[in-house]
Amino acid sequence: FVYPNPNNGQFGVLFNAVKDQTAQVIISDMSGRTVQEFALDAIKGANKLDINLPNLPKGTYIVSLEGANEKFRERIILN
């Protein structure tokens, strides 16, 4: 779950992990080009990630989160 959406480049990602794991977070534009990528140490249960992307142009992006057995994708709008 990404909030708020739309946003100004500052947003949060809430997700549940089935176990402690390292997850990969990828922000890509609509052409599939990766604009930001980083690893996240997630704990079993609820996790919250704050993201700040102040230099990205306005537009639509995809937030992808991939863990050991989990995948999450959500479209976001920067305005």
Image (spheres, rainbow, N blue to C red):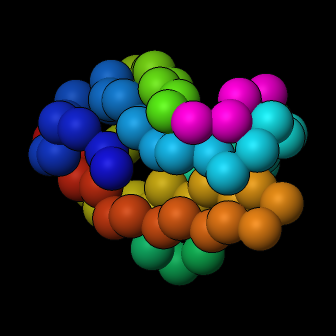
Confirm whether residue 56 shows in the render.
Answer: no
Specify whether 15 is left or right of 6.
Answer: right
* Quadrant of the rendered image containing residue 76: bottom left
Specify whether 77 is left or right of 24.
Answer: left
Specify whether 49 is left or right of 14.
Answer: right
* Quadrant of the rendered image containing residue 54: top left
Residue 1 % position (x, y)? 33, 50
Specify whether 25 is left or right of 8.
Answer: right
* Residue 44 highlighted magenta (yes or no): yes
Q: Residue at x 23, y 53 (%)?
A: 77
Residue 29 % position (x, y)? 49, 64
* Residue 35 highlighted magenta (yes or no): no
Question: Total label count?
Answer: 0
Q: Nearer the viewer, residue 69 or 28?
A: 69
Q: Residue at x 22, y 30 (%)?
A: 8
Q: Nearer the viewer, residue 15 or 79?
A: 15
Secondary structure mainly formed by the magenta segment: strand
Residue 69 % position (x, y)? 77, 68
Q: Nearer the viewer, residue 33 or 43?
A: 43
Residue 56 % position (x, y)? 43, 38
Q: Residue furthest bottom?
A: 31
Confirm whether residue 6 shows in the render.
Answer: yes
Q: Residue at x 71, y 59 (%)?
A: 66
Above or below, 11 against 68 in this view is above
Q: Nearer the viewer, residue 8 or 17?
A: 17
Q: Residue at x 49, y 55 (%)?
A: 63
Above or below, 58 against 75 in this view is above
**Which region of the structure is painted magenta?**
40-45
